[in-house]
Amino acid sequence: MYVAVKGGESAIENAHRLLADRRRGDRSLPAITEAQIVEQLSLSVDRVMAEASLYDPGLAALAIRQARGDMIEAIFILRAYRTTLPRLAVSRPVDTAAMRIERRISATYKDLPGGQLLGPTFDYTHRLIDPALVGEPDVPEAAVAEVTGEPVMRVADILAHESLIELEPRVDAEPGDITREPTEFPMPRAERLQSLARGDEGFLLALAYSTQRGYGRSHPFVGEIRIGLVEVEIDVPELGFAVSLGEIRLTECQMVNQFKGSAEKPPQFTRGYGLVFGQSERKAMAMSLCDRALRAAEYGEDITAPAQDEEFVISHCDNVQATGFVEHLKLPHYVDFQAELGLVRRLRANYDAARAAEPEDDSFEEAAQ
Amino acid sequence: MDASTSLTGGFADPVFAAQSVFRAVMDCMARPGTIGTIGSEATAPGALGAAQAAIALTLCDADTPVWFADTLASPALSAWLAFHTGASVAPDPTTAKFAFLGLGGVPHPDFPIGTQDYPDRSATVVIEVSGFEAGEPFTLSGPGIAGTQPLSVAGLFPDFRTFWQANRAEFPRGIDLILTAGTRLVALPRSVRILD
Amino acid sequence: MTAIEAASADLSSAQHERARRLALLARASRDELEAAWAALPVQPSVTALRGPETGLVMLRGRMGGDGAPFNLGEATVSRASVRLGDGSVGHGQRLGGDRQAARLSAIFDALAEGGDRVAVDALCAAIAARVEADAAREAAETAATRVNFFTLVRGED
């Protein structure tokens, strides 16, 4: 049964007006601007872009502001906006080897070509609240040093020289697109990576953690994390060659995992891969651990843990889908509930009636004992 | 590439033109057999008709490979389509989402008709005819038609009735057809039955 | 600008030059473009061939950085194609939603295609200088965070 009801227009209108008022907050304070959010809350902007699957810092900042800082709401708004735009082109695959490096570290090699470049990291900070940041403190310019010009070699290429790491076959097959094709399992790795790249950071982090705690252990090492700017190029048919559209910031994580070998594959290191919009190291690491866990079948490993269960991980990693389905529960279910209420009342009446009939039997039995 | 014809001939006002053409196509699809008119001018290189060009600009994009019959196909037309819509030419008929055929053109037997689970994965075929006044008379029925709808078409390929019966027999799979004559069009979605 | 140079390998010298110009115009700020437009001795008449419009480009990565491609996510992109009074055609495209900047880029591309290089070359040189200076400063800041390990004790007994 479907019952259409009307009402609440003025309540809704006033609720939205109240939302706008609370979003603005104390009028005696200056309103924040998108530019301030882009510059000073840039990692929030990065997270919203990554999980909305749309790279546009200005729009992400606007979404954060509109959502009062609620990240999933901001992701939702930006993801929805994405659907209003036509797709004009597909880029050439970005070349992370040619990245303009802002940070690059390896946990597997101390001295490696290009060096360990810490960049703007929270690592080695004391993680104590810093009262000196209150107000508008003077911030000194960043230190500079001479650039060596030494190429920043990939860690995977170092291991590849000894043939001790699996090689990624460089084929140029057209990858599937989860925004165009219905989800089907088992899913090719290309589509899994697309899902994971926009997956919820918290969900993927928890799954990655579970693999470390023994639920699908993969003996991981951070071969390399690199953050920096890569060139975006598209082929323009009317020009007949590829043109650059500018640069985007990406975080890439190469996780190196021990693998004892199987009937088909020799003992070697295997790989999990993470690639995320913006400076998003935690997410890139979590993504690479999940990617490796989801490759269990490829290596003939037993699938025993949640992080290895493709359908479980992929179906639940999208926070826009998840919030839509969880939050829809707060919408009116008056008719559904009336039906359930009627059912429970009837069941209760039957139960009570049965109970009313039973005690005599019980007392009879007790008396008999 | 011949830039003079490939870069011109788009809609003067792309947003409003595409909306009005979409409306015309939608109305014709909703009321099979009725004659619609394209009010927005688009000019493609070669023999592609005015309504066909406008439909291509409105419905085709980077996600819809397009098949052109040999009588229409040319490098200039491919370049025009790519520049204005982002669509590429389908490498073979089985991958076509849209197909454009000239006067008397016959749909390729390999155009996709969708699957039982995804009947939408089929081609929409746009065929130029000579007119809707004189010509072979048809009586149509089906969804969107109250009772029956008369239609006359001149310049359609021979044995159209047989072709359409076979197409109708695959329902819900099948191709959808748009017939164009200059700036006018008639839609025959796969749900239409030709009574006689 | 090594990335930009590498982008245009295997092209004729004219294509190479145009690819470099388009890459620089894509990095120009709106202010740089508007100032250059205002400073033109004669502003050409401009006919729009396509756009300006904003849409999406699907960004692709490679598995493991060097393997098979996959779709990473999309970015906003704005583009415009114009024809000037002398018939020369230009294209502008850049990341982001700034349609006016894309249109001005297309105009400068068309000017250069039409042989009117002075203003465009000056604009591109200024953009290149700024972009290179920014890149050099950022690289120097990153270089200052390089870890130089030194061995304290090597335990071998």
Image: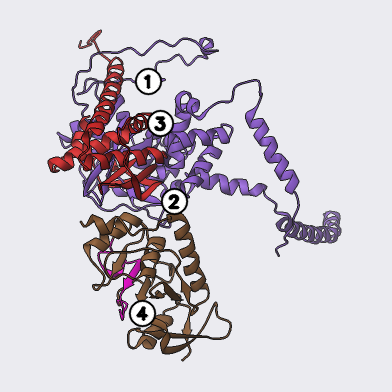
Chain colours: A purple, B brown, C red
* 4 and 1 marks in contact (CB < 8 Å): no
Label 4 vs label 1, nearer the camera: 4
User: Which residues lie in the magenta part?
Assistant: B89-108
How far apart are the alpha carbons under marks 3 and 2? Answer: 25 Å
Label 3 residue SS: loop
Q: Which mark, residue A120?
A: 1
Q: CA distance from mark 2 to mark 4?
A: 50 Å
Percent coordinates x, y for residue A186 in the rendering: 38, 55
Q: Which residue is mark 4?
A: B129
Q: Name the front one of labels 3 and 4.
A: 4
* Mark positioned earlier in the residue sequence (1 or 2): 1
Could you tell me the amino acid type at mark 2?
Glu
Residue behind mark 3 = A280
**Chain letter of the residue carrying label 4:** B
- Secondary structure, mark 2, is helix
Residue A53 among those drawn in magenta: no
Kind of residue at badge 1: Pro
